[in-house]
Amino acid sequence: MSQITQELLTHSAMTCSQEKTTNKWFGAPESVFFERSEIRKVLEKLDKVCYIIRDENGRVGIANSMGATNGSEIVSYELISPVPSFTPEQLGDPKFKIAYRLKYNYMMGAMANGIASAALVIAAGKSGMLASFGAGGLVLAKVEEAIDQMQDALPNGPYAVNLIHSPNEEALEREATELFLRKGVKVIEASAFMNLTPHVVRFRAAGLRRDSDGSILIENRVIAKVSRVEVAALFLKPAPSSILDQLVAEGMITAEQAALAQQVPMADDITVEADSGGHTDKRSLVCLLPTIIGVRNEVQAQYNYKDLVRVGAAGGIGTPESLLSAYSMGAAYVVTGSINQACKESGSSDHVRKLLAQAAMSDVMMAAASDMFELGVKLQVLKKGTLFGMRANKLYDLYVKYEGIEEIPAEEKNVLEKQLFKNGLETIWKQCISFFQNRDPEQITRAQNNPKRKMALIFRWYLGLSSSWANEGKQGRELDYQVWCGPAMGAFNQWTKNSRLALWENRYVADIGTELLKGAAYLFRIHCMAFKGIVFDPGIRSVEIK
């Protein structure tokens, strides 16, 4: 279809098809608008159908209603196209909302060490959004305290708690699972898994039973966050019989639960994690999401589950455009992360919130991770305003190069003690012993006659505490703050730079979620018209924050 040229945009706030139609619009002249600001106001009424019209002078405008109103005179114009209503509640898969009792198909992912705090989860839940408490890295007493807070504030949900895979500290994963089962947690977000473990399988199977009609009831829901196809496949398929048999033998689940677990997938939902903050493979969402949706479809054809496993999108989600893109590619729901840490309800500090509010998309880097340090796993962190990333990678280089603390040259060791640890390495080792005696004594036992293991635990002391220092805003340690952050933070800052949300003091998770969803719904209407050859000018196509 041909379109009005750019030269005529002063007479029309949009370009559109000049192809004549036989459709007519009838209504009051005062309900028709031609100016950009008025056209935007009409389009922003997301729950109302509106109409693109052309008057007798060839001007293209928009009408917010059709028909007579209060006895007004009626005019007749050419009707180019109706604009369908479309609300934020319509984005994504309605079955996700039903499953978790939500208003929106929108989730806030867990950020460890309580950055995704109980307050954040509660604020999200009260606004009809799902959030996952960042239990990773916290002692069980703190996790239990947070669960109590969430259950008191959200007795019927929605809330989730993160179960993070801990390959080097198996006891943490086991004890967290036992806590969740004892406290009646019904939804977990399983993250950083490279393979299925008895603990995540136990949580899933322990919530299975037969209903009165013989159907399988799934009471313990699993949302698996993955970035690899092979890991997604594990959660899309039923639990392995080898693990189920082991759990039955140990009395962790019943034989009936094991049998039922072989008839349902390991997860209800798969979150495809692309270029995110924290643990990430920095995958491209436009490549990874369709691929895993395709794998889901193949597994569904094989097992013919009663309920289709839903696939959501995470990583790089920080603008209305990114939300709509994810939904348009088939995401049942979207998950935000980095942008939530910058909000008032997060478990981070005001210093970190200020740094995040100033970040650009390029102000991130990959750094050695604490929880999988020995495996060389890295995570994405903020590099502006902190030296953590460079210092963490330096520690990993030393770990690879030397077999123990004793082998590190005196000059290097001096730098470590004065700049990073601000204490002697042997003093730090004594603190490690004290820490792990309460958390996981086996870690100390394994390091007693293993110099390299001892060195790893000492280095992990710094890597682990750096996140806590950032969360509490510890003075004197600002350059050591570990701040998990992905490029979505910079994109969000760019979008909000001229709005009230530019100030970190004004950022609240539910408000941000609502603005993103409204913006995505608004853009959906704009894109619907573009498919019909009706292209609005840039001033209308951009999303404004109210």
Image: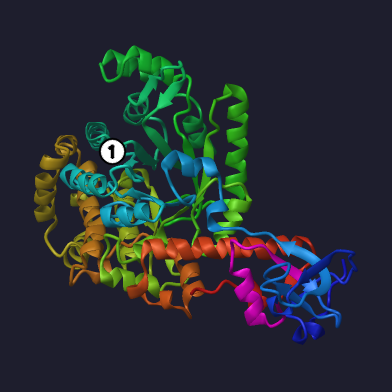
| Disc 1: CA contacts within 10 A as few (<14), some (14-19) or many (>=20) | some
Q: Which residue is mark 1?
A: 168
Q: Residue at x 87, y 72 (%)?
A: 18
- Per the image, label 1 sits on a secondary structure element best described as loop
> Which colour scheme appears in the figure?
rainbow
Quarter location, residue 501: bottom left
Q: Residue at x 36, y 43 (%)?
A: 375
Question: Taking 56 as reference, is 510 left or right?
Answer: left
Where in the figure is residue 213, as x and y percent of width and height? Answer: 46, 17
Where in the figure is residue 264, as x and y percent of width and height? Answer: 47, 24
Q: Is residue 487 visible?
A: no
Is 528 above or below relative to 312? below
457 or 30: which is nearer to us? 30
Answer whether residue 29 is magenta in the image: no
Quarter location, residue 421: bottom left
Is 98 above or below relative to 214? below
Where in the figure is residue 543, as x and y percent of width and height? Answer: 57, 71
Q: Furthest residue to the front?
A: 71
Counting labels gives 1
540 or 196: which is nearer to us? 540
Q: Residue at x 59, y 40 (%)?
A: 293
Residue kind at label 1, given as amino acid type: Asn
260 or 199: which is nearer to us? 260
Q: Residue at x 79, y 69 (%)?
A: 26
Viewport quadrant of the N terminus = bottom right
Quarter location, residue 201: top left
Q: Is residue 111 visible?
A: yes
Question: Taking 77 as reference, is 178 left or right?
Answer: left
The magenta span reads 32-52
